[in-house]
Image: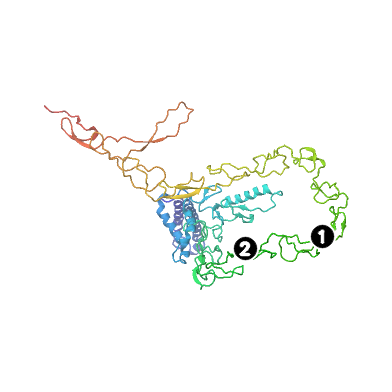
């Protein structure tokens, strides 16, 4: 049976086509109509054009409907409700897509695909239903949805989700740190690996993995969200070559190109090597002169020589002492005062072990008294005496001056009594100037988390960030937020949970919290559950979630009272509708019917047994459970 749109279009097209091809009598065959006038008034071409235009309109509508049907089939094939009967075809198509993606790489390596393990895992997850989950909305990523891929961890996110994530992250950081809100450009992190991106890197377009094609179409013969062309991204670490795979998720594999390189020390001849593994050692001794200029390197072929590991006699900076020191650090000081005669001839150098000439005598320049009010030019052998005036130097409080006479050394602590305000500004009290006044009032303001109070004594208003643990339940409903108390929603749970099949052979790793709504992975191993009926060897079937399907083999148990076996299908566990509870009144709503598994007894034996009537007039088949003579309803006739 064809769909309605196809029937309607075909019917309309047939009707119009029939009207257009209906034979019409020629004008010259019509009686009483001149030939010349018939040529002028012939309506045939105008009617044919109208029929053709209607036919084209119907054809375009049919093509549009067919295109919508194909798109709906493609989108439904990528949903979570895939048909389990198409496992073999899906695996074959998946294998062909993976083979075509890796062909350009394996042709360079002679068929060796050992370096494609990590990239192959990302590609396999693309085709596994439920394996890819957006960590922001905790929903499956389908092949028809626009996505964005992180360049650090290669995780996929829905494009609208990552755009909202970037806006909210920048908003929260700006509101918590900026005094002039929104003026600074703060980066936003990846939800999984915390790789930071500038605000200008916020994705605004749906691009393929290699970034060449915008809005890549959903092609069932390509990797989802791929453009199908060669990746050509620069490989890391940078070697000058580009990726040879088709547009793919995950990291690019190591470079497979063959290059001719020398060994690490450069002594051996160049050899052909893989570009991703081009570093090799000739296993010869290096022999280069080390930085100490005394010894040579004894290690095998390498790139950079390490510091000299030997020790030797090294002189200190001033040259007075000699000690065994590592060759890698020959410069050292003996920690002795120099003591050399200064240029004045009266004093000695007071600096610790140094190289070069000693500095000039510090007393040979113009000196002042301790308070700095009077200056005098005295020989370096004479001390400058205090001037006898008031010191008047600023004390440590920077508000008062020293009231003592000119003296050597530091000034005393300020002890003047002033009327001081506490740090929070609520109370005032007369006390010594050098002491800080802290009241006992606790700050009632909330911290930056907007959940807890500051409660710090005499807080001046700059409340510190909250140091408590958030502890709110995450979206997975299994763990609590371990971060410091914060504003806004918590980050998604970083844990992953394995989802296993019933036998445990197949494992699917999903984000925490997704395990309750994710289907177990498809497993090709045979089911290992023991049969739930009396048959010892159940029907072989694949591993599956939930209970095994009901047994469809014949019961074959011996029936009671006869020698026949039960021919009915196995009825050890049958879903039976439970009895409904009688309602107390019209105000109660009837509950939904419930079913329970129950073992049903074998039905009575229905095998026909030829049995004669009492008068032995006829022989009729009687069911085995009703075995015995019967009355045929006729007269007995016996003497």
Q: In this view, does 394 lie to the left or right of 450?
A: right
Colouring convention used in this rendered image of the protein: rainbow
Seen from this angle, which residue lies furthest left? 639
Can residue 176 be seen by looking at this rendering?
Answer: yes
> Under tag 2, what secondary structure?
strand
- In the rendered image, which quarter contains the C terminus? top left
Separation of residues labelled 1 and 2 (CA atoms)? 38 Å
* Other-residue count near label 2 (Cα within 10 Å), few / some / many at <14 / 14–19 / ≥20: some
**In the rendering, at what x and y percent does residue 134 appear?**
54, 50
**In the rendering, at what x and y percent does residue 578 appear?**
39, 33
Compare residues 430 and 376 and report the one nearer the observer: 376
- The residue at 71%/65% (across/down) is 355
Compare residues 403 and 555 and report the one nearer the observer: 403
Give the mark nearer the N terminus: 1 vs 2. 2
Identify residue for label 1. 363
> Under tag 1, what secondary structure?
loop
* Other-residue count near label 1 (Cα within 10 Å), few / some / many at <14 / 14–19 / ≥20: some
Identify residue for label 2. 325
**In the rendering, at what x and y percent does residue 180 appear?**
71, 49
Q: Is the residue 604 above or below the residue 398 in the image?
A: above
Which dot marks residue 277? Answer: none
């Amino acid at each position: 049976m064809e769909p309605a749109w196809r029937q309607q279009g075909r019917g309309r097209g047939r009707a119009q086509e029939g009207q257009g091809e209906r034979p019409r009598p020629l004008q010259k065959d019509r009686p009483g109509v001149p030939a010349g006038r018939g040529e002028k008034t012939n309506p045939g071409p105008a009617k044919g054009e109208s029929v053709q235009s209607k036919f084209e309109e119907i054809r375009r509508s049919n093509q549009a409907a067919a295109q919508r049907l194909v798109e709906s089939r493609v989108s439904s094939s990528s949903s979570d409700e895939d048909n389990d009967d198409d496992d073999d075809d899906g695996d074959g198509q998946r294998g062909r897509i993976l083979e075509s993606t890796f062909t350009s790489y394996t042709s360079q390596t002679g068929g060796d695909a050992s370096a494609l393990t990590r990239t192959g895992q990302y590609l396999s997850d693309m085709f596994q239903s439920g394996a890819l989950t957006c960590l922001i909305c905790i929903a499956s990523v389908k092949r028809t949805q626009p996505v964005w891929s992180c360049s650090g961890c290669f995780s996929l996110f829905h494009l609208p989700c990552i755009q909202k994530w970037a806006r909210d992250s920048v908003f929260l950081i700006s509101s918590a740190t900026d005094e002039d809100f929104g003026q600074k450009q703060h980066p936003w992190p990846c939800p999984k690996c915390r790789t930071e991106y500038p605000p200008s890197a916020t994705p605004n377009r749906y691009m393929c993995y290699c970034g060449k094609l915008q809005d890549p179409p959903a092609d069932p013969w390509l990797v989802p969200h791929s453009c199908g062309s060669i990746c050509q991204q620069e490989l890391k670490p940078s070697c000058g070559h580009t990726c040879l795979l088709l547009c793919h998720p995950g990291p690019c594999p190591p470079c497979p190109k063959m290059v001719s390189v020398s060994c690490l020390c450069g002594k051996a001849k160049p050899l052909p090597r893989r570009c991703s593994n081009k570093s090799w050692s000739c296993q010869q001794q290096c022999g280069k002169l080390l930085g100490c200029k005394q010894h040579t390197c004894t290690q095998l072929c390498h790139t950079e020589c390490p510091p000299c590991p030997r020790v030797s006699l090294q002189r200190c900076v001033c040259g007075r002492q000699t000690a065994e020191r590592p060759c890698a650090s020959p410069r050292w000081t003996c920690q002795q005062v120099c003591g050399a005669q200064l240029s004045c001839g009266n004093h000695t150098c007071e600096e610790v072990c140094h190289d070069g000439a000693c500095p000039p005598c510090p007393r040979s320049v113009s000196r002042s008294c301790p308070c700095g009010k009077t200056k005098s030019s005295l020989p370096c052998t004479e001390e400058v005496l205090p001037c006898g005036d008031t010191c008047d130097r600023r004390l440590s409080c920077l508000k008062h001056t020293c009231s003592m006479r000119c003296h050597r050394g530091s000034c005393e602590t300020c002890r003047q009594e002033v009327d001081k305000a506490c740090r929070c500004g609520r109370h005032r009290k007369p006390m010594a100037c050098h002491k800080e006044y802290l009241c006992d009032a606790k700050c009632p303001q909330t911290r930056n988390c907007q959940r807890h109070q500051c409660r710090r004594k005499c807080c001046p208003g700059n409340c510190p960030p909250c140091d408590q643990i958030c502890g709110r339940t995450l979206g997975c409903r299994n763990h609590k937020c371990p971060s410091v108390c914060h504003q806004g929603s918590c980050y998604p749970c970083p844990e992953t949970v394995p989802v296993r099949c019933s036998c445990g052979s197949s494992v699917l790793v999903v984000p925490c919290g997704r395990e309750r709504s994710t289907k177990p992975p498809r497993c090709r191993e045979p089911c290992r559950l023991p049969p739930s009926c009396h048959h010892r060897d159940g029907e072989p079937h694949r591993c599956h979630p939930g209970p095994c399907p009901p047994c469809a083999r014949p019961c074959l148990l011996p029936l009671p009272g006869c020698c026949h076996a039960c021919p009915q299908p196995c009825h050890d566990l049958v879903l039976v509708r439970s009895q409904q509870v009688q309602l107390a009144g019209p105000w109660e709503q009837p509950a939904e019917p419930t079913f329970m598994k129950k073992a049903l007894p074998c039905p009575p034996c229905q095998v026909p047994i030829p049995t004669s009537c009492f008068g032995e007039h006829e022989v009729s088949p009687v069911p085995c459970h009703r075995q015995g003579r019967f009355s045929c309803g006729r007269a007995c006739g016996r003497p």
